[in-house]
Amino acid sequence: MADALCAVLGCEHPIIQGGLAYVGNGLLAGAVSAAGAFGQIGSAGRSPESLSDEIEIAKERANGKSFGVNLPISEHRDIEDYAAVIERKAVDLRAVSLSAGNPRPYIARFQACGLKVIVVASTAEQAIKAATAGADVIVAEGYEAGGHNGPAEITTMVLVPQVARAVSVPVAAAGGIANGAGIAAAFMLGAQGVQMGTRFVATTECVAHARYKEMLMRAGAADTCVMERSLGRVTRVLKTPFVQHIMELEETKPGFAELAPYIRGERNRLAAVDGEIGEGWLNCGQGVGLIHEIMPASELISRLMTEARTAVREGMGALGP
């Protein structure tokens, strides 16, 4: 089953690294791809010029392996500038993943540059629309995932089989997956691979601050929460005093203007990259409870695949003849 996803993305292992915004840079994407999975550079939180630079870094680090760029549509006011970078750098990329917005205006456009297009969907209806519009891969992301999620709040366990039945293109499961057993489970649900975000933050190549990584290793699944619900949005983050203040503020039903100083992307950068935990928030999925150590991306991917194969064998054996 993994062959379908790997063939589209030009990778050896059916693991996609999530975009990860500020901490998803070229160094991490290149390391993930060099290890046989599919690395991605996050465009959120960086300038078009910086995105171009990170693509060059990933190209150098990937050792000829395929990698891509994540483009969260609604996160960019000047999205045309980012699209132009992707088009200009298309020869160096394998794919672009589209999230947080309507992907249909961009699918054929990026495919015309020779790129494969991955679309992140949080409902089966979204997946069907994306596949009908020509998407090459669907990432079915449950609301266990860190960062921005769909307002329907459908869990990965429920979402993935619905999407797998609804579309004919390869499906990658996402949300709460942080070990090989989760990868095996994704296959049992009908997916052809997975996308993982939080787990890749806890790698040596990730630019995330040491405080962020240490907090991930100490946290359990109950240590995440969803903020921005008062604005009709779902953003899963790590529980911290800063986030608690946001949650208390949201209870007063504030408007966007009142919340904006606390939820803007710069606050994420302050905490995730600069380590100013008291000044910002940290994206974090519920799979954090399965993260216990920091390791190089290559070692992580090797371990994940070994765990996944073992879990599949043991799971099938448990069902009997």
Image (cartoon, rainbow, N blue to C red):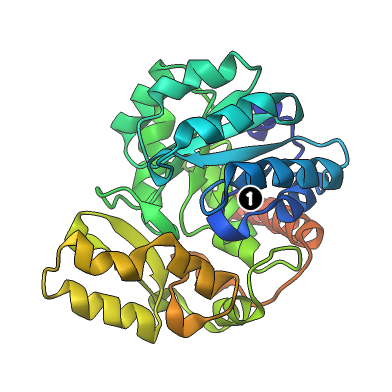
Q: Residue at x 26, y 55 (%)?
A: 233
Q: Residue at x 67, y 53 (%)?
A: 25
Q: Position of residue 106 (x, y in %)?
A: 46, 23
Tell me if 200 is positioned left or right of 13 in this view: left
Quadrant of the rendered image containing residue 9: top right
Count of number-bearing discs: 1
Q: Residue at x 49, y 82 (%)?
A: 277
Residue 253 higher or lower than 161, as above or below: below
Quadrant of the rendered image containing residue 14: top right
Residue holding disc 1:
312
Q: Residue at x 72, y 50 (%)?
A: 26
Tell me if 16 is positioned left or right of 296 in this view: left
Q: Is residue 267 visible?
A: yes
Tell me if 131 is positioned left or right of 115 in this view: left
Q: Position of residue 292 (x, y in %)?
A: 64, 77
Pick the quarter of the image with the N terminus: top right
Crowd band around label 1 with a 10 angstrom C-alpha radius: few (<14), some (14–19), many (20+): some
> Circle 1 — which element?
helix
**Amino acid bearing label 1:** Val
Residue 19 higher or lower than 201, as above or below: above
Q: Position of residue 126 (x, y in %)?
A: 33, 31
Q: Is residue 166 visible?
A: no
Pick the quarter of the image with the C terminus: top right
Q: Nearer the viewer, residue 306 or 258?
A: 258
Q: Nearer the viewer, residue 4 or 90?
A: 90
Q: Nearer the viewer, residue 93 or 194?
A: 93
Residue 79 higher or lower than 240, as above or below: above
Q: Position of residue 101 (x, y in %)?
A: 36, 37
